Image: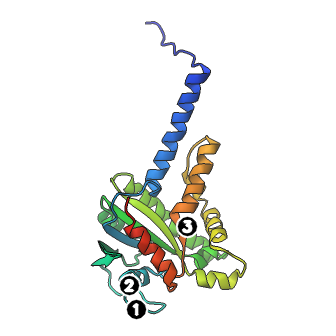
Amino acid sequence: MQPLVLPVLGPIAGGILAGLATLAVEITIARIFGLIKPMKKNSILILGMDGAGKTVLFKRLQGIPCEKGEYTSTSDPIEKSVDINGRRVKLIDYPGMEEEQVNSKYEAHIKKNTFIYLLLDIMCVDDDSDEGDTYRRKFRARMDTIVGVMQKLKGCGLHIIATHFDEYLSAHPNASKKSAKVALYNKFEFGSLIDTQNKRAKEKCEKNFVDDRITIVSLFNDEDIRKIKDELTIKK
């Protein structure tokens, strides 16, 4: 049997294939991180780290008054169908959990066409102590689990919300939300999730991730809550 000989690609064909490879990488990353947003955000699952403000966000999106430090006192998810900006959506507040429960719990409750808000406390991320390292490791593990589940489903979206920006500003008076985003991105080394040798594609995906998939908020700031509501109800 004669060996298979592949034709040598000319510069035009090679350029086309390189372009297609770049596009494929960008679309794959975009799907994973929700850069290509689901057409409808009818089911909103609020996940995240303990103390990040999941219950506060859950209540604030409903217009319910709440205080700092509120938390979910039940081990079961709380669901509520609410009108936000004239659109009916289902909010699901998922309680905190032990790390060994994360995989099974997330796989059981992340369904197709679910939009996920993944919350973390930016002050814990900013902590350079061993506790901060542990916090970042646990969050990254949870995010990896979510991404793994999302890859098996259709129509899911993921948005990271970093809370307690008011406290962050007290520690970093000259900071902006943009600089906080970049600092958070670098702390987690999110770029390592983007596996490509194409530098241009990698840089574009990283920029999109920072710009579109990370939001820095103070949960008791009315303008920040308004922007979240607008995102939930934007028509695509």
- Looking at marks 1 and 3 on the same chain, the residue that comes earlier in the sequence is marked by 1
Q: Which residue is mark 2?
A: 59
Contact between marks 2 and 3 (CB within 8 A): the answer is no
Residue beneath the point at 62% across and 73% down: 177
Residue beneath the point at 41% across and 78% down: 96
Contact between marks 1 and 3 (CB within 8 A): the answer is no
In the displayed structure image, the side of residue 205 where residue 93 appears, left or right: left
Contact between marks 2 and 1 (CB within 8 A): the answer is yes
205 over 162 or under it: above or below = above
At numbered mark 3, what does the secondary structure look like: helix, strand or loop? Answer: helix
In the displayed structure image, the side of residue 54 where residue 18 appears, left or right: right
| Residue type at the position of mark 2 | Lys
| Residue 117, percent from left and from top | 43, 69
| Residue type at the position of mark 3 | Arg
Q: Which residue is mark 1?
A: 65
- Looking at marks 2 and 1 on the same chain, the residue that comes earlier in the sequence is marked by 2
The mark lying in front, picked from 1 and 3, is 1
Q: Which residue is mark 3?
A: 137
